[in-house]
């Protein structure tokens, strides 16, 4: 089974190949220009930047759609695994076996995590050992929470201390969940700040574009006429990097993984593209 990270990698590689061909098409047909500095070739132009924006929005949307189901799975496990291990400890304390405790505790589960425990239960009912059943579900659960299910195996081997093992694990998991929830609340305060960074940069780029246009239209002979279109494209490239880094950084802080942050990248990029293409015309006026 192909992992979602490999799917993301394939999407990016195919995008780069197709976009390279699309760029060549724009250059050949005069919709884009090429600025050559030594061995460096930089495509630029107003039509070209519009095309790049549309292509990147499609790319980020595709990446976000691919990552969304896996992000939902992660959240399903993250929100329930602490209470699940805690319920297992409660049932163990009442005198049931570990397997019976798992059966009783899974009744309160829902979504993807319920499916994982159901598969583990099915493997055990078919005669597999607990360790083999855990190994089977770890392929779907992933490394981030896979080690936690191993706690059940440790509890089984600990004999009379299985209750203590499960209770301590549950307390630790609930503490981590509380910490992650607190971290998310704290970092959400910086969302507006990062969005303002994108807005300020785009306003700055628009004013620079206005000044360059003024110099280009000047009739004074001693003023060097800048290539406004090329400088605008360089500012545009910078804005793409700013929005991309902002989205990934914020998503990594909130979601805990850069591969689950593409919906934030899409948010920052959509705002950036809307401003970077409209503000120069708005500021310049009629």
Image: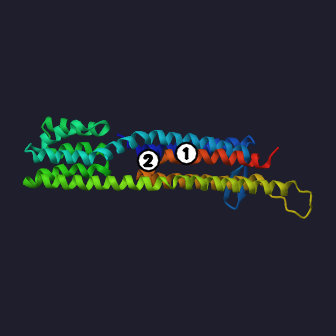
Q: At numbered mark 2, what does the secondary structure look like: helix, strand or loop?
A: helix
Q: Nearer the viewer, residue 32 or 270?
A: 270
**Residue at disc 1, secondary structure:** helix
Give x and y (percent) for residue 247.
52, 51
Picture quarter containing residue 109? top left
Which residue is more in the foreground, 168 or 115? 168
**Which color scheme does this rendered protein use?**
rainbow
Q: Which residue is mark 2?
A: 260
Q: Is residue 114 left or right of residue 257?
A: left
Q: Position of residue 13 (x, y in %)?
A: 51, 46
Residue 38 % position (x, y)? 70, 62
Write down the quadrant of residue 204 in the picture: bottom right
Tell me the crowding category of disc 2: few under 14, some 14 to 19, or many 20 or more residues within 10 angstroms, Cα based: many
Q: Is residue 75 left or right of residue 247?
A: left
Which residue is disc 1 drawn over? 267
Quadrant in which the C terminus appears:
top right
Lower sequence index among marks 2 and 1: 2
Counting every numbered tag in the picture gives: 2
| Residue under the point 21% across and 45% down | 134
Disc 2 from disc 1: Cα separation = 13 Å
- Left or right of residue 152: residue 227: right
Answer whether residue 122 is visible to the viewer in this image: yes
Residue 68 appears at what percent x and percent y? 43, 40
Res 241 seen here: no
In this rendering, is residue 41 above or below 137?
below
């Amino acid at each position: 089974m192909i992992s979602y990270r490999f799917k993301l990698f394939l999407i990016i590689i195919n995008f780069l190949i197709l976009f390279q061909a699309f760029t060549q098409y724009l250059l050949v047909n005069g919709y884009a220009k090429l600025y050559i500095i030594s061995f460096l070739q930089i495509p630029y132009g107003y039509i070209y930047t519009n095309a790049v924006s549309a292509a990147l929005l499609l790319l980020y949307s595709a990446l976000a759609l691919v990552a969304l189901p896996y992000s939902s799975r992660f959240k399903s496990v993250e929100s329930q695994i602490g209470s699940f291990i805690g319920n297992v400890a409660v049932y163990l304390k009442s005198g049931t076996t570990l397997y019976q405790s798992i059966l009783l505790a899974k009744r309160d589960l829902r979504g993807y995590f319920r499916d994982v425990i159901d598969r583990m239960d099915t493997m055990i009912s078919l005669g597999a050992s607990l360790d083999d059943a855990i190994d089977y579900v770890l392929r779907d659960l992933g490394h981030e929470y896979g080690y936690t299910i191993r706690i059940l195996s440790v509890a089984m081997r600990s004999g009379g201390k299985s209750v203590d093992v499960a209770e301590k694990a549950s307390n630790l998991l609930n503490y981590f969940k509380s910490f992650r929830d607190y971290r998310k609340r704290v970092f959400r305060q910086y969302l507006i700040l990062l969005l303002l960074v994108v807005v300020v940069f785009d306003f700055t780029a628009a004013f620079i574009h206005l000044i360059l246009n003024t110099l280009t239209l000047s009739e004074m002979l001693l003023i060097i006429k800048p290539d406004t279109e090329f400088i605008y494209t360089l500012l545009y490239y910078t804005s793409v990097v700013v929005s991309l880094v902002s989205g990934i950084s914020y998503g990594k802080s909130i979601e805990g993984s850069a591969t689950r942050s593409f919906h934030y990248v899409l948010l920052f990029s959509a705002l950036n593209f809307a401003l970077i293409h409209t503000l120069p015309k708005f500021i310049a006026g009629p």
